[in-house]
Image (cartoon, rainbow, N blue to C red):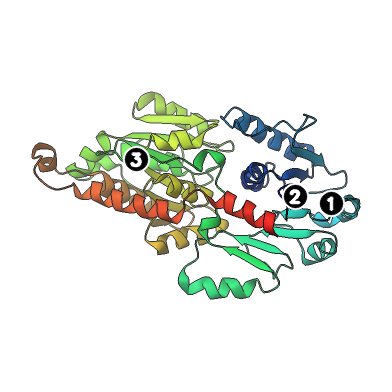
Amino acid sequence: MGSDRLIYFRADGNSRIASGHLMRCFSIALACLRLHMKVCFLVSDEESESLLTGIISTCERTPLPDLSLNPSLPDSRLSIIRLKTAAFDCLEKELPEVLSLLGSLADSAAVYFLDSYYVTESYLSSLRPLVKIAYLDDLRLFDYPVDLLINYDVIPDSAMAAYKSSYQKAKRLLLGPSYTPLRVWFQDKRAPLREQVSHILITTGASDPCHFCLKFVSKIFGAVLPFGTDSPPLKNTDLADLKVWQSLTLHIVIGKFNTDNELLFQLAKKLPCLVLHENVSNMASLMQTCDLAISAAGTTLYELCALGIPAVSFTIADNQLSSARAFQETGLIPYAGDMRDNAKAVLQAAIDFVTEMSYIPDHYLTDKSVPLCPSYAKRLSILTRMRRLIDGKGAHRIALALRET
């Protein structure tokens, strides 16, 4: 098909479902715009529209000289429509309005790209006579009747057959991490590999319901928490661990819905090695300053791979479990466990990971004739394989498939 193809992106974002659907669709939309396609976002409410407009504004502040992202410009190839009858958690309500919109199209080569956990088989079947359909999936709830199915899970070889059998109604499949639609800031970035580990990134996502950050700081520094802790501070452990942690700076990303922010800021005033980050507009730049990461499983793990930052993951929600286990199976990102089941073990596993990846025996610092430090060599091996798994070109690959669908 021609490069002037129109792609409708149907996605939402709000305080209940966060911004992930809109963010990954926008990454693909940018790739479509670069291939000279037209893009129109369909959203269900004012909150989704506002969130999308904010994403666009953030991208406009990033150097994108080849794109015009202002939807209000007459010649813009990017537009936004807020559906009048839509509800983000019940797509069936909007069907008559969407069918009317698609039925009025002069361009029969349009593609309807859907990213919603509330999709139903009847919704897809109703649209299919009017338009080509692409669906971005990570739940495998049913066999989706679509023209293009994308699932960028890290899929072990042993599970690939099961994935393909789940999608028998889809005409074309794009499966695996090579189709990861990274945010634009991560697509061409690499983190430097430093000889010594100095900076650790800690992120739990938008919220921290299990109080991971507070408990982690308490475990290391013996801080007193209002809800207590069942594990002793690191100062009671061996000298080697202490030597590692005394030289590190911890960068904690405080999500929008983190209820522990006031307590964390109180601790940061007493601990110079604790740096807190709120309202981070360019996570890639922050990550590039760090040598290791401790992260809740999910999209962040893909971004850490793209940058090449060795990490350990943990889970605080059910929808993170498959991602954590899949990355562990690759041997790239170890899984510390679920904070809801055994917080003490998760905290210790995260500490052990940082200690192993950071520790440099004294003789490696004084004797320059010895080979690479084991911890440095291990980080080099891991980051090389991480970048091979996620190369940052996933959104472009999806855009090419949309142009060809």
Is residue 92 in view from this perspective? yes
Q: Residues within 10 Å of mark 3 (few under 14, many from 20)?
A: many
Q: Which residue is mark 2?
A: 5
Q: Which residue is mark 3?
A: 291
Please name the amino acid that badge 1 sits on: Asp
Quarter of the rendering containing residue 19: top right
Q: Residue at x 45, y 44 (%)?
A: 212
Nearest to the observer: residue 308 or residue 232: 308
Is residue 138 in view from this perspective? no
Please name the amino acid that badge 3 sits on: Asp
Front of the two marks 3 and 2: 2
Sequence-earlier tag: 2 or 1: 2
Nearest to the observer: residue 239 or residue 124: 124
In x, y percent, where is residue 232? 31, 45
Describe the element under mark 3 as helix, strand or loop: loop
Q: Which residue is mark 1?
A: 107
Q: Residues within 10 Å of mark 2 (few under 14, many from 20)?
A: many
Residue 40 bears which disc, if any? none
Please name the amino acid that badge 2 sits on: Arg
195 left or right of 286?
Answer: left
- The answer to whether mark 2 and mark 1 are in CB contact below 8 A is yes
Sequence-earlier tag: 3 or 1: 1
10 left or right of 94?
Answer: left
Q: CA distance from mark 2 to mark 1?
A: 8 Å
